[in-house]
Image (cartoon, rainbow, N blue to C red):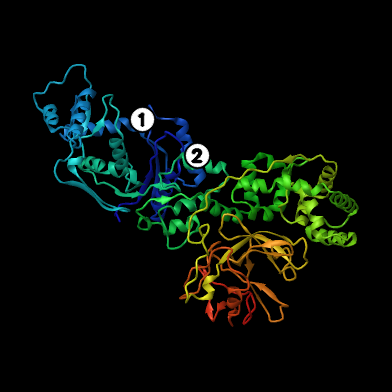
């Protein structure tokens, strides 16, 4: 570590937007400077007049502001320092460490062609250096020379890279490169060295595509007698196909992600994890990143930009937002939400678990902001067409018009349940037409919560619209089929599931994961069952039915709660609804008390629980019959005297600690 005060910089060229790689470079420089209590500076490298785009410069600055990477001091414009760059070039000329070159473009092309013909690297001939530096040389008339630096011919130029380790270049491969063009403008190689020196940059942290520039820049430092900064070259970012990240992979500009509904703290967190790590930590605040950051945590190999992981991380930060911030974010991106701010606040806890981006948040809130008559999805439209469905909607309109009680989900539920009893219909026969008419979809938050959020008058009006046939029908969206990744958890067509090892512990044959409730609703046919959608880190949430309705209210069993899920059971029908998994709970022997197992803070959604010293891969997804392995495992599952979940007396843990029961000790788990 250098003894100089830490000063880093981000120095983009204003030729386009702030791309993902540039955003990560800026972030790493920012974190490094803040970690050591130093300065983080911003320099716009705008000396290339032909490629300079002032709108691009503004976009880069705006992108950094959105990302939350705040620079210190004034922005340095490289173009304003041309005189200083020329001054250094002329100083090198004065010292004999640079020379004026009068070669024409055609001469240089011929020399390069000759080198290519002889299959040797091109290097500016020393004979020309001697010619132009001879005391009796007479410059040709009408030719403006360029200025080239005289690089060392012998030995090598190297440095101890803070990320890549020791790097050396043979000096024979370092050309006498141009530092000042014929029009007097500096080249990048000169300007960047002069600016870094004058700005007292202590550490240059940049992409590994700049490694080849470094020996040339070190030659300038040596020629001027300056101390070079420490260099750290971070690996490039690749797309999912292993190629350098580009537009063909999707959005690559930081500002594009703002428009797509990503939160800056999610992007910061994700970019931190591209080629840098702190143990197994995946989710952490910017303050923690500043505390932990160092170049010794960077990897040498390229990182892969995983759009799905970014989206999952964004979902976490959306859930962390308070209602004021998420409302303001939504309205800024989608002004049409502004008139519905109050209702959005009411629904915030229903909407957050259903969204991984702010665009999905807007879509989840469609039932709130949709203009009347609302559009119905094709499947939902089928639930408002039969005579029975129309009669149900007519009865609900009459009930709501006469209702004078409190307008809350808790107050409305028993009123509507009583109506089903009086009419001799099932809850599903009530909920289906109501959900379709009120939300336009068959999937929504709980129907009582929807009624509460929309308000009495709006609910009645939407039901009347549906009865009158005023709704348009939206065609179902065509989903792009993505090829499933080939992994050990998925069997090839025509093959049998992978067999477990003969001595493998039964517990490890089950795929028990941390899940997150993203949607819950009453089973349409059973008073005992909850239906839930659970995110277990797969492409889509799993739908599971659980016999917990007698033990958990809607307030207790709501989206946002973490649970433990067995994920490789064969799907089975429960009361006519398919259930693809099982939520684990502790229960007393009489089954009169049941508690959901508690997942420790910090455990990641989708991670598999484990027992130290008990190893084995789970059987493939959706392959385990409930009557085979499951009973063998459950027979040995119980809570300990200290309420920890155990199997055969061994504690079941996550990366963040053990699974526990809130209050039940020495009880079975099932």
Which residue matches tag 2? 62
493 or 525: nearer the eye? 493
Q: Residue at x 44, y 56 (%)?
A: 290
Disc number for residue 367: none
- Tell me, yes or no, if residue 71 can be seen here: no
- Tell me, yes or no, if residue 273 can be seen here: yes
Asked if disc 1 and disc 2 are in contact, CB closer than 8 Å, the reply is no
Residue 326 percent across, percent down from the top left = 63, 49
Which residue matches tag 1? 48
Q: In the displayed structure, would residue 458 be above or below residue 278?
A: above
Quarter of the image holding residue 542?
Answer: bottom right
Residue furthest out toward the top:
141
Q: Is residue 387 left or right of residue 209?
A: right
Residue furthest out toward the front:
494
Residue 598 percent across, percent down from the top left = 61, 70
Tell me the quarter of the image containing the C terminus. Answer: bottom right
413 or 577: nearer the eye? 577
Q: Is residue 291 left or right of residue 151?
A: right
Q: Residue at x 59, y 51 (%)?
A: 356
Crowding near pointer 2: few (<14 within 10 Å), some, many (20+)? some
Quarter of the image holding residue 280?
Answer: bottom left
Crowding near pointer 1: few (<14 within 10 Å), some, many (20+)? some
559 or 221: nearer the eye? 559
Q: In the displayed structure, would residue 622 be above or below residue 91?
A: below
Q: In the displayed structure, would residue 548 be above or below residue 447?
A: below
Element under label 2?
helix
Tell me the quarter of the image containing the N terminus. Answer: bottom left
Residue 322 percent across, percent down from the top left = 63, 54
Pick whichever of labels 1 and 2 is earlier in the sequence: 1
603 or 393: nearer the eye? 393
Quarter of the image holding residue 419?
Answer: bottom right
Residue 398 percent across, percent down from the top left = 90, 51
């Amino acid at each position: 570590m250098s003894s100089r005060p830490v000063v880093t910089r981000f120095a983009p060229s204003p030729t386009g937007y702030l791309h993902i790689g540039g955003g990560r470079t800026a972030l790493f420089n920012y974190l490094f400077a803040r970690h050591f209590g130093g300065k983080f500076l911003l320099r716009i490298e705008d000396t290339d007049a032909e490629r300079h785009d002032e709108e691009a410069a503004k976009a880069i600055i705006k992108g950094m502001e959105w990302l939350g990477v705040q620079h210190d001091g004034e922005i340095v414009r490289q173009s304003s320092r041309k005189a200083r760059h020329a001054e250094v070039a002329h100083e090198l000329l004065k010292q004999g460490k640079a020379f004026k070159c009068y070669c024409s473009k055609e001469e240089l092309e011929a020399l390069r062609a000759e080198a290519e013909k002889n299959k040797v690297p091109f290097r500016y001939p020393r004979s020309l250096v001697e010619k132009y530096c001879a005391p009796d040389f007479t410059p040709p008339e009408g030719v403006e020379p360029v200025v080239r630096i005289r690089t060392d011919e012998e030995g090598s130029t190297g440095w101890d890279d803070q990320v890549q380790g020791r790097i050396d270049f043979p000096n024979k491969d370092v050309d006498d490169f141009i530092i000042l063009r014929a029009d007097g403008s500096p080249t990048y190689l000169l300007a960047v060295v002069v600016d870094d020196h004058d700005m007292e940059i202590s550490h240059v942290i940049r992409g590994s595509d700049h490694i080849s520039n470094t020996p040339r820049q070190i030659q300038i430092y040596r020629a001027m007698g300056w101390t070079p900064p420490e260099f750290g070259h971070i690996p490039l970012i690749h797309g999912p196909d292993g190629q350098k990240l580009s537009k063909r992979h999707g959005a690559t500009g930081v500002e594009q992600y703002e428009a797509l509904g990503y939160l800056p703290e999610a992007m910061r967190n994700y970019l931190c994890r591209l080629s840098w790590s702190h143990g197994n930590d995946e989710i952490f605040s910017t303050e923690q990143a500043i505390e932990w950051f160092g170049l010794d945590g960077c990897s040498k190999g390229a990182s892969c930009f995983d759009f799905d992981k970014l989206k999952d991380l964004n979902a976490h930060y959306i859930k962390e937002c308070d209602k004021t911030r998420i409302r303001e974010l939504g309205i800024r991106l989608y002004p049409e939400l502004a008139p519905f701010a109050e209702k959005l606040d009411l629904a915030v806890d229903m909407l957050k678990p259903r969204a991984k981006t702010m665009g999905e948040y807007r879509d989840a809130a469609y039932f709130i902001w949709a203009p009347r008559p609302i559009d119905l999805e094709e499947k939902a439209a089928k639930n408002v067409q039969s005579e029975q469905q129309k009669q149900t909607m007519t009865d609900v309109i009459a009930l709501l018009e006469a209702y004078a009680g409190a307008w809350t989900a808790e107050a409305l539920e028993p009123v509507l349940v009583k109506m089903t009893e009086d009419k001799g219909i099932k809850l599903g026969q009530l909920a289906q037409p109501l959900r379709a008419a009120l939300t336009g979809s068959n999937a929504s938050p709980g129907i009582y919560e929807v009624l509460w959020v929309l308000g009495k008058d709006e609910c009645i009006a939407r039901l009347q619209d549906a009865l009158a046939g005023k709704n348009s029908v939206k065609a179902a969206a065509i989903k792009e089929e993505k090829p499933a990744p080939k992994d050990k958890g998925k069997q090839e067509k025509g093959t049998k599931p992978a067999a477990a090892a003969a001595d493998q512990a039964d517990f490890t044959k089950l795929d028990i994961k941390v899940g997150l409730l993203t949607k819950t609703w009453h089973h349409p046919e059973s008073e005992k069952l909850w239906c839930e959608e659970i995110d277990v880190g797969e492409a889509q949430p799993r739908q599971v039915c659980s016999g917990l309705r007698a033990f958990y209210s809607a307030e207790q069993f709501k989206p946002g709660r973490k649970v433990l899920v067995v994920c490789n059971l064969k799907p089975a029908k429960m009361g006519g609804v398919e259930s693809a998994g099982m939520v684990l709970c502790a229960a007393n022997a009489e089954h009169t008390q049941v508690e959901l197992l508690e997942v420790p803070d910090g455990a990641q959604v989708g991670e598999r629980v484990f027992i130290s010293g008990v190893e084995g891969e789970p059987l493939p997804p959706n392959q385990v019959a409930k009557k085979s392995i499951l009973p063998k495992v459950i027979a040995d599952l119980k809570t300990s005297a200290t309420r920890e979940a155990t199997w055969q007396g061994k504690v079941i843990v996550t990366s963040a600690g053990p699974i526990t029961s809130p209050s039940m000790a020495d009880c079975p788990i099932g």
